[in-house]
Image (spheres, coloured by chain):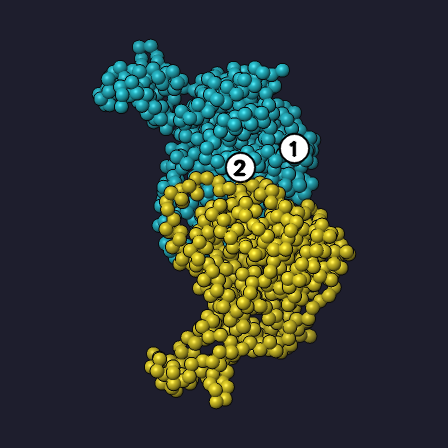
Chain colours: A yellow, B cyan
Amino acid sequence: MPANFRYVALADEIQENILNGVFTPGEKLPSLRKLKNTLGLSISTIHQAYIELEKRGRIEAKEKSGFYVKALETSLLDRPAQETDVGQPCQVNVNEMAEIIIKDLQTDRVLQLGAAIPSKELMPLKQLSRIMKSMPARDLQNSFSNYDLCAGNTELREELSKRMLGLACSIQADDIVTTNGCLEAVTLCLRAVAKPGDTILVESPVFHCFLQAIEDLNLYVVEIPGCSEDGILPDTFEKAVLKNKINACVFNSNFQNPLGSVMSKTNKAKILAIARTHDIPIIEDDIYGDLYHGDKRPSTFKSMDTTGMVLYCSSFSKALSPGLRAGWCVPGIYRDAVIRLKLNTSISSPGINHSIVAKFIKTGAYDRHLRQLRNRLKNQVSAMIIAVSKHFPTNTKTTFPTGGLCIWVVLDPAIDSMEIYQKTYRENISILPGTICSTTDTYKNCLRINCGTKWSTKVEAGIKTLGKIIGNSFNTLP
Amino acid sequence: MPANFRYVALADEIQENILNGVFTPGEKLPSLRKLKNTLGLSISTIHQAYIELEKRGRIEAKEKSGFYVKALETSLLDRPAQETDVGQPCQVNVNEMAEIIIKDLQTDRVLQLGAAIPSKELMPLKQLSRIMKSMPARDLQNSFSNYDLCAGNTELREELSKRMLGLACSIQADDIVTTNGCLEAVTLCLRAVAKPGDTILVESPVFHCFLQAIEDLNLYVVEIPGCSEDGILPDTFEKAVLKNKINACVFNSNFQNPLGSVMSKTNKAKILAIARTHDIPIIEDDIYGDLYHGDKRPSTFKSMDTTGMVLYCSSFSKALSPGLRAGWCVPGIYRDAVIRLKLNTSISSPGINHSIVAKFIKTGAYDRHLRQLRNRLKNQVSAMIIAVSKHFPTNTKTTFPTGGLCIWVVLDPAIDSMEIYQKTYRENISILPGTICSTTDTYKNCLRINCGTKWSTKVEAGIKTLGKIIGNSFNTLP
């Protein structure tokens, strides 16, 4: 390798370690002398690498002390302001756009900053494929030859009942129904608690597939604006419930998609109490709950649910494998209704896929994997915020989520995210326009950016391009 | 083996060959002398075996000519009479019973004459498991790491588009949407063409899951009585359509479940023309179409559909593997609506399972397997009819289906099939009571019997027990 590239290679390697969580924000990096001895490179090459990383915004020099991994300054950009108006019940009418966007996500040539999934380098794919290959032929044949139980693969439900300790009150395998991913869980639960014409309350901006599922089930929606830190506040919730006849709620209770908000345990308890008073079931989608960046997993509604009115939903799509389609729900008192609906919709889930997930959990590898993934996502989210603060116009606001894998970016009010989406897409970069996260045009000037893609110069270059497109739109505004 | 058991073993072996289709109905069996030379058994043992098979109703002696495989006498039992009344639109209200019955089917200790599936000995399970085990790790990993296309696994859709030659007008892979089994295809199609409060026309008696899916989607149903040979007649169809506002039809066009009826090509064309005049989409569930017992596959509505108003649905659950959950539909002009609904219900199907099916088809093994399976089912259905005619009361009527794997049995009008179900279940035999195949009580005295279970003395003994229970109910009627 030519000498003048050596420092770039070293900078890349250290950056990789920062993103991997080997070096954490605020940590001191090894001294030049120490690295010289370990790596056998010249002091000058190592110094150049550190300077390069400083330029990239990854590390900072402290006088007479050395180089440190840069801590994420929360003052980098402002947080979005919270809306306070509660919406009227609306017929959902998210247009065809969402389909196009999700279809686009299937293409390899496009930089995926749209769909909220970790990239394949972050998933334990080798282990999963090894488990599949080592399944006894007899088990495979048994699984092929029969409809699995409608409630789902027994092995997986047993593992899930153990994992849900603390997340739900004394759950047994029989309380769980497996599904084809989390969205199937949510739609089955929606069908179990609401009939056509009913009204569903959601936190806004909202995961666009919830809106579309609600539309497709001929339901109405009331959107409550969430705060990017605390989600829905109990007072706002009570106001909405008193104002409208609400038949059910659908909440991402932890690291809400797209805001990244987390309702505190106290607020969850208050909201649950209000819902109970008004006899409103809560569908809790906790798909991002395990992806906390801090030390502690956030709480769930289900853990405080003594009456069975919370229908807990989740899946392994965000942390393990979207392709295996392993989701589940704990529908409380609606269990029989959910099983019946599943039976009459698709009879049963493919047992073999769910059995692979169960076997992976059993090895203990899932918890190890989750620890790595959380670290990784935490650092990628930081890297994304830094890149956005560097390349986007200065009046941009962004969330600073404490879990999950997305950031929500609020642009100048005059900017149309659909236009940005289209222009960006021509550059082979996919993002999610805020427009589709509501039935109103409140989030027209917002974007959701996926931070699950492994950090690389390609990602940084993509953000630079995106920033340039936004800047140009801004400058050419009438 | 003691000499007095040798003839039983030989009889069992020949019976197995008859059910396997090695010897076909009407065929002359090898002479005693020939078998003596081939098998090295005594003439007396072979003769005893033939006498035993004669007793079992499998073969018959023709004077001075030898022994022949018994042809199925269609005069064994009467065919069911056809009802002619067209029903009023009804709110569907099939009760919880169906769930219990399907749950029961999961138990091993129960003789499965209820669910309409072939038993595992009839499926190419070894080959499927070999394909799964030999999948390149890279393919597995790719499939795990991404949501598959919402329209479905490309490999499978390509194989399907070739297989559907002649069954649909110039189909391409892009016209196909894969699903989690056939029932998901039907429910997605129903949601694409009908909104809550709409009315769906079906052939009666009807597959109970259709009724339940219709109920769960808040739709109404009009039942048209089918004839056990021709299904729905065009005149009856037109009468029903003129009398009621019908928004869509759901038909098992070939070997209808449970009647086994097949609409002729001419009748299909007439019904399609009437439907077109009244702008009524037809959801065609052709899941049994490949299981014809004769020489020729029956036609489909889809093959005559020039306007795209037929939504064709099928799956591999009856012929290959229920556990892989590989279904599909060709929704015609409703393709975008179906894809959108699938996206917002479960995002995508697990690609790996569908890829196994595609690879199995590619080897050419599927067509060989189908040939064997058809022969097998044909003979098992004959064996079941013979057993029913032998063990059930003489006023029993039964269908003589020319495809599929079920027979429909009409008992004395005073008999309640739910009671028979319960009594039979106590003897660890599961059947499907006719009661759940309609919103009316027209089929209260009927049963559907699955002939997919490999024929054995256990099955014959089960039918004997069932016959006894029916006979006793009959004798104790008030």
Q: Badge 2 sits on which subunit?
A: B
Q: Residue at x 53, y 23 (%)?
A: B409
Secondary element at tag 1: strand
Same chain, labels 1 and 2: yes
Count neighbours of disc 2 (C-alpha within 10 A) and say few if under 14, some if 14 to 19, many if 20 or more: some
Q: Residue at x 59, y 52 (%)?
A: A169
The residue carrying mark 2 is B103
Residue B318: % across, % down: 47, 37
Q: Is residue B321 left or right of residue B88?
A: left
Q: Which residue is mark 1?
A: B222
Tell me the quarter of the picture where residue B236 sits.
top right
Q: Which chain's residue wears label 1?
A: B
The spot of residue A118 in percent (x, y) is 50, 63
Q: Residue furthest right?
A: A243
Quadrant for residue B121, please give it: top left
Give the structural element (helix, strand or loop) at label 2: helix
